[in-house]
Amino acid sequence: MIARTLLAATAALAVAVPAAAQDFAITNATVATGDGSAPIENATVVVRGGKVVAAGANVQVPAGVPVSDGSGTWVTPGIFATVTDLGLVDVGAVGESNDTSARNSPFSAALDVATSINHRSQHILVSRAAGITRAAVAPSAASSIFAGQGAMIDLGDDPQAVDRPRAFQFVELGEAGGRLAGGSRTAAHTLLRNALREASRFGEESGLAGGPSRPAEVRTGDDIPIDPRLVESDAERATDVLLTRFDAAALVPVVAGRQPLYVHVERAADIRSVLALRQEFPRLDLVIVGASEGWMVADEIAAAGVPVIADALTDLPARFEQLASTQSNIGRMQDAGVKVAINAAAMEQPRYLSHFAGNLVALASVPRAAGLSWGEALASITSIPAEISGFGGQLGVLKPGAAGDVVVWDGDPLEVSSAPVRVYVDGVEQPLENHQTGLRDRYRDLDESELPKAYDW
Amino acid sequence: MRAAIRVLLAATATAALAACATTEGSGDSTKSASAYDYPDTPYPSTYQPYPGVPTALVGATVYDGAGGRIDNGTVLFADGKVVGVGGADLAIPAGYTRIDGAGKFVTPGVIDIHSHLGDYPTPSVDAHSDGNEATAPTTPEVWAEHSVWPQDPGFTRALANGGVTSLQILPGSANLMGGRSVTLKNVPSRTVQGMKFPGAPYGLKMACGENPKRVYGSKGRTPSTRMGNFAVNRQTWIDAHEYAAGDRDERDLGKETLAGVLDGEILIHNHCYRADEMALVMDMGKEMGYRVTAFHHAVEAYKIGDLLRENDVCSAIWSDWYGFKMEAYDGIPENAALLYQAGACVVIHSDSENGIQRLNQDAAKAQAAGARMGIQIPDAEVVGWFTLNAAKAMGIADVTGSLAAGKMADVVLWNGDPLSVYSRPEKVWIDGALMFDANDPQRRPVSDFELGQPGEGDVK
């Protein structure tokens, strides 16, 4: 059975030839570049060779580039969704279709989602149709505070979904982390410190210190290179270690600051404890996820230069670590100078990102609330998550040299009534059909006078 | 779907059943009503409207909830009741406080037909998990109002951010028959009795599909299959008939509820996702002599819009939740619009302490999905999805849900188009009393739980 599956996968790889990027220009559209600036009316976007070459007003379309009239439409960069489980799940409650977590695995930090991304997942197709072109995919912690290593993916209709494997390590340090560590936050912090020290020592003894998390030198024919940290190592380890060899190896680049450490915490006090980790582990490349009470320590987060992937509309004390949650959280953090992206994990579906961003714009007209400008709100789901993910200037923005991830909308992209009419990834126009559109078309009417609905496809 | 686990928990919490012992308890028009040998109104509502001032909202776009739209409209209310709704020419009696609504919008108070506020309150700790009496597959004897914690901070968010003035609290969906629901006015209160909507009928929460068979099958009990679900339900109804046909002298809490359903006094709110199951449930109702008032969640309702229309059953739905469990796999954003096209009743519900703050946005999403496939639905009709249609399915449409003279003055003044993501409630009145004002930091409820805590009284 396994062999058959493998053969099938190999065959699929062999026949799947990515469509070539098209050169195209869209004129007379309302263009929002995603960099935080206001939308520009009657503007033009030009994409050549899979890259943006121009975006804005007064742009001349080069000769030979096909032009489409974008009158009445809006054009934005593709949405960058972080953090998600796209490609890891078919049906959340159907365990065998859900690869987000591994409660019974002996491994934790070593878990690497890049091996498991299904680019044909319906959730990827549905998200693509909602204008999402890139995503950070993270595992969920279940057997340890370490969830494992997340990947950066694109949502293009080709098998090469993973753009960057092992892009970050994800760890739980709040209420959830405390329970996973054995029952308390203190246990979680102790476990973390022990793990980082074991990793540091293992890295030195095995010659892996600072080893890159995203090596490019070992190519194996497919798109995901082998992780050199998992090759044979003869380094002897002490008998009182807690981490498996693979888990220790996986944390080597975290300690060295070569792989970002995404830390999920909500409470202000927990955020402070995370920021303090740098006193012991100065090279940690921290990203805070959640941060419901971030507004209470916004100045400290800003001073530390740590970016935040924050819940946008969480405003209830769902847990004791979220007592001060408010929809003004992101606006207040941004006002304090924190780099903030909207957390896609804090909503039912990633496709709500544009609506949540629109809700933050709404707050600007609510007395005493702190919201975002329209341009800032778009940036919080495009350029800022791209920057936090290590793709600043390359993704989530329409400017020369950036990837040709372009979405054409039938209206204001942050309005709940709007939707994409065209989506491009790396300059390739994408199909927008999926299971849902098939059902929609089949049940457009309920006429079965000639044949059952099963023949309508 | 990272949120799927939470969704699953919420869905598990979703079954409810409500029955109203308040209606005509001593009437003798039916043998059953006269035969009830218990107080008409146990745990009676003590809700009294708070004071208000005669108010004239002028210059706003008014959606009346019943499909009407008035530009530059006037809405008058006094003594807790709507006095008049009209255009700019509607005379404003002396003594009314004028509120300029130019550029703003007025709708009836938002109504959520499917909420677990109070019975699954925040903080969402185990000690607060009071929505599923998951110890037997049928528990028609439990009443949601006995679980509602009035200090749930979620009520305040639903008011301030969602404009919610009335809501139905349902038991969860672990059980085939989860218990009675309770309908509340969204007013802060020291007691649940102080929130109970006067005269609202009870509902009985039922659930089909995965949840009951999973919960009990995993315990090695029946039901463990969908056919088991039906067998247990049918036998329970047969037993209820025997009770209802008798003298009803001996108190039996569960059978009293079921008899209330058979008498037509208690409304069935049936959690059900799949089209084929909803069709079977409607036939079970015919077999057993009851009617389903609304299917809740109903992600496949669009496949049987004709059946739902013919059986006069509402679908209380999200705009686009899908895929978090097997029976939700075929959810599509066009569900509401296709139901509307088929002439079936649409209600937008939340089943969420977060979604209840944005029912208006959810309706707008569903409307837009329809427009993209060529189904044009007027804004004024869409507003009815989270106002009058919900009231109808909750049995309170004669007193609230639309702006009409004599109805409760449950009113929201929005700072913009309620079908836009950019709009929020500016003022919310319940029975003519101003219960939320975005411009007045003090006119915002703060639950006991939040006093002295970080963020107390914040804009949230």
Image (cartoon, coloured by chain):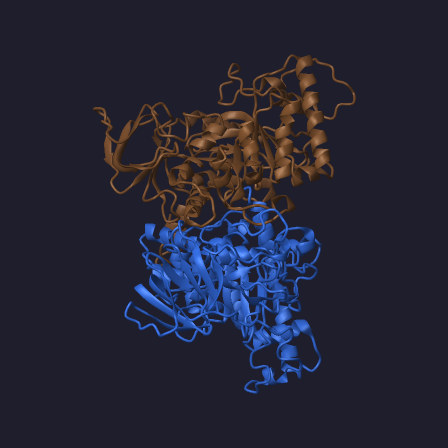
Chain colours: A brown, B blue
For the residue pair B302 and A267, the one nearer the viewer reads as: A267
For the residue pair B201 and A428, the one nearer the viewer reads as: B201
Q: Position of residue A167 (x, y in %)?
A: 54, 26
**Compared with residue A189, is residue B313 higher up or lower down, i.e. above or below?**
below
Residue at 53%, 43% in the rendered image: A346
Residue at 69%, 75% in the rendered image: B252
The N terminus of chain A, quarter of image: top right
In the displayed structure image, the side of residue B367 where residue B391 appears, left or right: right
Q: Residue lying at the far left in this picture: please name it.
A: A63
Residue at 54%, 68% in the rendered image: B268
In the displayed structure image, the side of residue B215 where residue A165 appears, left or right: left
Q: Quadrant of residue A133?
A: top left
Task: Mark yes or no: residue A14 visible.
Answer: yes
Task: Mark yes or no: residue A141 visible.
Answer: no
Q: Position of residue A151 (x, y in %)?
A: 53, 29
In the displayed structure image, the side of residue A358 where residue B1 appears, left or right: right
Q: Position of residue A337 (x, y in %)?
A: 49, 32
